[in-house]
Image (cartoon, helix red, strand yellow):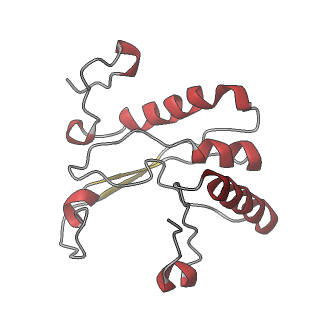
């Protein structure tokens, strides 16, 4: 299934990644990295790829690491809390709710190497976990090793 951008995406210059087509997804990411570097742009990425129903952090996809490897630009983590209360998944209705936005120190990527992609995904995910309220930390799943557990029990 091919994903076509909506009119709003085009107007806002959003880029959707078609994860059902790995070749197209990789090319879209390369195109984004080239545009970022060439035009000195900032890019906002939601590394989970989707939103959880309960506001808890989900596992991260690898796309943001691939973009970092290609652009060599720093990652500036932005932790949003409370958004799941304001705009619930699968709803078009936005309601009043307290939100918090926390900017964290930049993470340098200019020395990252392609053989450590999983390490970078975990490292950045851990940065988010360590800056979330308990209610938005990922749940520990049965069978996960201690190296993958968050502080939430």
- Residue placed furthest toward the front: 1
Closer to us: 93 or 73: 93
- Residue placed furthest toward the top: 146
Name the residue: 28% across, 59% down: 83
| Vertical arrangement, residue 83 with respect to residue 138, above or below | below
| Vertical arrangement, residue 11 with respect to residue 101, above or below | below
Closer to us: 141 or 18: 18
- Residue 41, picture quadrant: bottom right
134 relative to 8 in the view: left or right: left
The image shows a total of numbered marks equal to: 0
Q: Residue 25, percent across and down?
A: 62, 56
Name the residue: 54% across, 34% down: 121
Quadrant showing the C terminus? top left
Q: Is residue 58 visible?
A: yes
- Residue 34, picture quadrant: bottom right
Q: Is residue 72 visible?
A: no
Q: Residue 23, percent across and down?
A: 67, 53
| Vertical arrangement, residue 72 with respect to residue 83, above or below | above
Q: Residue 28, percent across and down?
A: 67, 61
47 relative to 13 in the view: left or right: left
- Residue placed furthest toward the right: 38
Name the residue: 23% across, 74% down: 94
Q: Residue 48, percent across and down?
A: 43, 48
| Vertical arrangement, residue 99 with respect to residue 143, above or below | below
Name the residue: 28% across, 24% down: 151
């Amino acid at each position: 299934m091919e994903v076509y951008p909506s009119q709003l995406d085009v107007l806002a210059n959003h880029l959707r990644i078609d994860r059902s087509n790995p070749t197209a997804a990789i090319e879209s990411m390369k195109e984004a990295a080239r545009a970022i570097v060439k035009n000195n742009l900032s890019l906002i990425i939601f590394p989970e790829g989707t939103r959880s129903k309960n506001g808890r952090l989900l596992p991260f996809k690898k796309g943001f690491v691939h973009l970092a490897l290609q652009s060599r630009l720093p990652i500036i983590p932005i932790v949003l809390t409370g958004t799941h209360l304001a705009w619930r998944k699968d709803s078009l209705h936005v309601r009043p709710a307290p939100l918090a936005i926390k900017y964290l120190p930049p993470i340098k990527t200019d020395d990252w190497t392609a053989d450590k992609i999983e390490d970078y995904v975990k490292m950045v995910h851990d940065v988010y976990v360590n800056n979330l309220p308990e209610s938005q930390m990922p749940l520990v799943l049965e069978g996960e090793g201690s190296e993958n557990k968050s502080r939430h029990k």
